[in-house]
Image (spheres, rainbow, N blue to C red):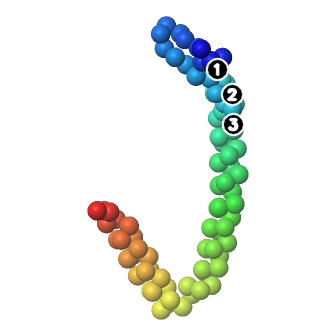
């Protein structure tokens, strides 16, 4: 039997060296990972929104944008066969 595996009441458990047995430590690592990925994405989205605000000031462009977004939304609801 491998050192990384143990038997407990007939159930085989495998211990991963990269994960901590402490749930709080794992939760903190996961929260940190989400933070590192999430913050740049939100900043990019906010910057894109600010840039689009200037483009969508004209009523014609705003209407075109709304129609395009509505069509994309409807297409995303169509089931893939």
Residue at mark 3:
28
Question: Could you tell me how far apart the alpha carbons at marks 2 and 1 are, in whole angstroms?
Answer: 8 Å
Q: Foreground residue, 9 or 52?
A: 9
- The structure residue drawn at horizontal position 48% and vertical position 14%, both measured from the top left corner, is 11
Residue 67, how many percent across, how many down? Answer: 40, 82
The residue sitting at the top extreme is 9
Q: Which quarter of the rendered picture does the N terminus lie within?
A: top right
Residue 4's disc is 1
Would you identify the image quadrant in which residue 42 lies? bottom right
Residue 24 visible, this angle: no
- The structure residue drawn at horizontal position 62% and vertical position 84%, both measured from the top left corner, is 54
Q: Earlier in the sequence, mark 2 or mark 1?
A: 1
SS category of the residue bearing label 1? loop
Q: Is residue 10 left or right of residue 79?
A: right
Q: Earlier in the sequence, mark 2 or mark 3?
A: 2
Q: Is mark 2 in CB contact (under 8 Å) with mark 1?
A: yes
Classify mark 1: residues with Cα within 10 Å, few (<14), some (14-19) or many (20+). Answer: few
Where 78 sits versus 37, above or below? below
Question: Could you tell me how far apart the alpha carbons at marks 1 and 3 are, in whole angstroms?
Answer: 24 Å
Q: Which of the two marks, 1 or 3, is nearer to us in this view?
A: 1
Residue 45, how many percent across, how many down? Answer: 62, 67
SS category of the residue bearing label 3? helix
Residue at mark 2:
17
- The structure residue drawn at horizontal position 62% and vertical position 23%, both measured from the top left corner, is 15
- The structure residue drawn at horizontal position 55% and vertical position 85%, both measured from the top left corner, is 56
Q: Which of the two marks, 2 or 3, is nearer to us in this view?
A: 2
């Amino acid at each position: 039997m491998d050192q990384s595996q143990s038997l407990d009441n007939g159930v085989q458990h495998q211990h991963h060296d990269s994960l901590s047995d402490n749930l709080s430590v794992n939760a903190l690592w996961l929260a940190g990972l989400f933070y590192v990925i999430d913050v740049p994405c939100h900043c990019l989205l906010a910057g894109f929104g600010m840039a689009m605000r200037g483009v969508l000031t004209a009523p014609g462009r705003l209407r075109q944008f709304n129609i395009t977004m509505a069509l994309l939304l409807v297409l995303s609801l169509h089931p893939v066969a």
